[in-house]
Image (spheres, grey):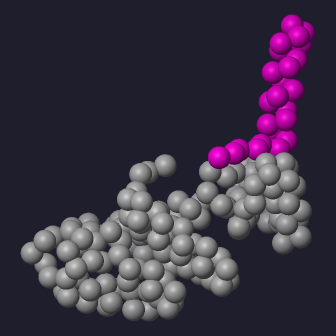
Amino acid sequence: MVKYHKDIVKEASHFYAKAKFEGHLEQVTNELQAILAGIQNTSTFRQMMHLEHVSYDKKLSVLESAFGHLSKETQEYIATFPSEDGSMNIVEALEAFLDIYNANKLEIVSAIPLTDEQMDRIATAFQNKTHKEYDSWVNTVDPSVIGGVQIKTKEYLLDGTIANKLKQFKEKISQTGLKR
């Protein structure tokens, strides 16, 4: 995990909890991911935000024009990071929030799309096993998965796919010394 300034992490944590409580977590996360992708692909934007000779008001006007279409919640979060001293920690703020989001997200990889009920059952079982509550889960369809599911989090990888079970079986057989 990348080290961020403690104030940025504190603000990101507070905003994450607020967005989750108010039911805006997915919308805000999608907006912040889009912003970060746009910023990372535009080095001039990033450079301008850190130039001391560019006025604070000019930086704010650029931010307002770039982010004016976003939800009120996202705009409020972004607005907390420009400071009068000229520092702009927007990229760090976005990354800190997304790190928190990713630490609380389950990715369920399967061969076919899962229903909400199936995802809820899998997520509940995984949360009971790990004794950790996750705020969101997404289903990723991977045609290379023959059957079963693979559950990924920032901390865990649980591979319950048929291919993995066959691989484990093959390893156990080879350890016994049996030959074909």
**Who's the residue at 32% across and 90% down the image?**
65
- Quarter of the image for the C terminus: give it: top right
- Where residue 135 sits, quadrant-wise, is bottom right
Image mark count: 0
Q: Is residue 138 magenta?
A: no
Stretch of the chain drawn in magenta: 155-180
Residue in the picture at 26% in, 86% down = 60
**Relative to the observer, which residue lies in front, 68 or 167?**
68
In-image side of 40 versus 143 (left or right)? left
Q: Position of residue 36 (x, y in %)?
A: 42, 70
Residue 50 x, y percent position in the rendering:
21, 68
Q: Residue at x 42, y 60 (%)?
A: 6
Residue at 60% of width from left, 79% of height from top? Answer: 19
Residue 60 visible, this angle: yes
Indicate left or right for 96 with 43 as reference: right
Is 41 drawn above or below residue 103 in the view shown? below
Residue 146 percent across, percent down from the top left: 82, 48
Q: Residue 111: image x %, image y %? A: 79, 56
| 166 with respect to 23 (left or right) | right
Q: Image quarter for residue 174?
A: top right
Q: Nearer the viewer, residue 30 or 172?
A: 30
- Which image quarter: residue 26? bottom right
Q: Closest to the observer: 21 or 109?
A: 21
Q: Is residue 37 visible?
A: no
